Amino acid sequence: MKNLLMYGLVLVTILFSSCESQDDSLPQVNLKATDLNFTVTQDAQRDNDVSMTSSDASLIPYWSYTDAEGNELGHSNQADFKVTLPFAGLYYVNYIVYTQGGAVEAAPVEVNVSANDEEYFNAEEWQMLTNGVDGKTWVLDMVNPIGYAGLDFPYGSADGDFWNWYPDYAGNEWLLEQKDWGEMTFNLNGGYNVSVTQTALSSAEQKTTTGSFGYSIADHTISFNGGVELLYGGDYHPDVSNWKSVNVLELTENSMRLAVIRDQSRSGEGPAQIVFHFKPKAQ
């Protein structure tokens, strides 16, 4: 009897959880992949420019696009979405919608870009960050390697969380140990390529990871893909949940400040940007 009662309680719990997990806000439709109504169109004059349109307003779309190796380059949940693919090569656009019947995914759409878009990288920020095809390697600037800033600094409202503290290392050695923390290299040699060599916290052991990155000049952000994380120094990794989405607070030919959000402070401090200061590696 005891075993039968326990079985009944487990069954009720499973049924209740199943009902609770259903999202009643989603459309009450069941679709097959062949029922999806969407288009992926390359510009006739510049096939680097790709437009994606979901034609059914009742569905919640999700787009993602990848390179030929399957590395995700970006995504969106907008009904109409445009993206520029600046490098020649093969890409895939994936389209998914969500209903109460579950996710429905269309077959990937193949996109073939015929030539590099030379104009896309005209902005000086690209040259500052990557030095183009040749690449550019950055290391921590140990004169003032780390600082803090408010969540609205430096592009938000001055009436908000708008402050910064960029101390010199001299006199603030408690911030991090004085040592070689590694290096970070960006290049545009056929793709958005990045490699990070990170030195361990308690030794001189180094680990190198490679992947791709995205850089939005308008949004002042850099994203890392393929297992790569931002180069950092000091014992700060546990204080931050996301080391792949990075804010660009400063970028010049000789100085770069990148920030992550301290959102799980071990000392109980509130959210803030932890800002790492980089300089080009000496050749």
Image (cartoon, helix red, strand yellow):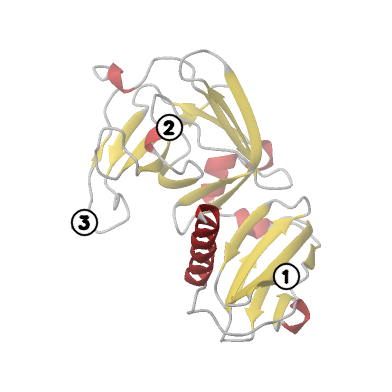
Instruction: Give, as a three-letter code, the residue at label 2.
Output: His
Q: Position of residue 121 (x, y in %)?
A: 61, 53
Residue occupying image coordinates x 59% and y 41%: 130
Q: Secondary structure at mark 2?
A: helix
Q: Secondary structure at mark 3?
A: loop
Nearer to me, 114 or 37: 37
CB under 8 Å between discs 2 and 3: no
- Which image quadrant is residue 131 in? top right
Task: Work out whether residue 239 can be spotted.
Answer: yes
On screen, 48 above or below 147?
A: below
On screen, 240 above or below 221?
A: above
Q: Measure the C-alpha gap from mark 2 to mark 1.
A: 42 Å
The numbered dot on residue 237 is: 2
Q: Which residue is mark 1?
A: 46
Q: Position of residue 187 (x, y in %)?
A: 64, 40
Q: Quadrant of the C terminus?
A: top right
Give the residue furthest to the front: 1
Give the residue furthest to the left: 159
Residue occupying image coordinates x 36% and y 21%: 176
Instruction: Give, as a three-letter code, the residue at label 3.
Output: Gly
Question: In the rendered structure, which disc, 2 or 3, sits on the residue that comes first in sequence?
Answer: 3
Q: Position of residue 146 (x, y in %)?
A: 35, 30
Question: In the rendered structure, which disc, 3 or 1, sits on the residue that comes first in sequence?
Answer: 1
Q: Position of residue 217 (x, y in %)?
A: 49, 55
Q: Measure the C-alpha gap from mark 2 to mark 3.
A: 26 Å
Left or right: 264, with 110 as reference point: left
Residue occupying image coordinates x 43% and y 42%: 241
On screen, 261 above or below 82?
A: above
Residue occupying image coordinates x 66% and y 36%: 210
Q: Which residue is mark 3?
A: 160
